[in-house]
Amino acid sequence: MNAVDILKEKGLKKTAQRTMLINLLQKAGISLTEGEIKAEMGDLYDRITFYRTVQTLLDANIIHRITVDNITVKYALNHSDRSHSENHIHFFCKQCHSVTCLENAAIPAYDIPKGFKSEECEVLIKGICDKCRNLS
């Protein structure tokens, strides 16, 4: 599905920034940082518009945010057949700094205290990805 179809399906207006961001994430096939997105957008990048666009796409479950550490945040496109409200594990490669969504890896059940209600679970595994391991 192309960017225009995704926006239309979610009932969002087609803007240059929304279309460009979705296209960039589709083309990359991996999560990207704001800096990587900025470099690709060139003159179309505007910081305020970027954050508004990101928030709109997050709210519509078109993309999701991956917090790697206190400094690095990446954005990834959601699959059209599910929203990001379904929790999944992310893998961060310490060598190439890529982040991969591990769709089929089960999140372990965590015992939380009585009276607490779990709404989201973020699991980030850090290590070396298969591509980097094969280069060694």
Image: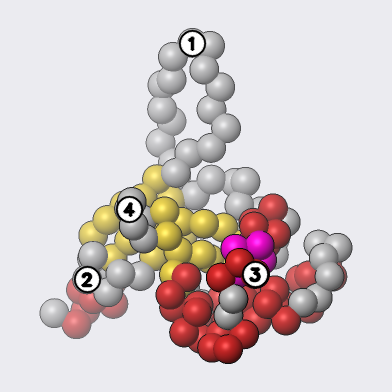
Label 3: state its secondary structure.
helix
Identify the secondary structure beneath mark 4.
Answer: loop
Residue with the mark numbered 1:
114
Give the camera-side residue of 46 and 26. 46
Q: Farthest residue toward the top? A: 114
Q: Which residues are magenta?
A: 50-54
Which residue is labeled 2 in the image?
95
What amino acid does circle 4 point to? Asp
**Counting residues from the N terminus, which is met first, the one under dot 1 or under dot 2?**
2
Q: Residue at x 65, y 81 (%)?
A: 20
Q: Is residue 37 left or right of residue 83?
A: left
Q: CA distance from mark 4 to mark 3?
A: 24 Å
Amino acid at the residue labelled 3: Thr
| Three-letter code for the amino acid on which mark 2 is drawn | Gln
Residues 105 and 10: in front is 10
Label 2 secondary element: loop
Residue 99, x across and y down, in percent: 39, 65
Query: Residue 22: image x %, image y %?
Result: 64, 75
Residue 49 lies, in percent from the top left, at 65, 69
Earlier in the chain: of badge 3 and badge 2, it is 3
Considering every residue shown, the one lying at the far bottom of the view is 43
* Residue corresponding to mark 4: 69
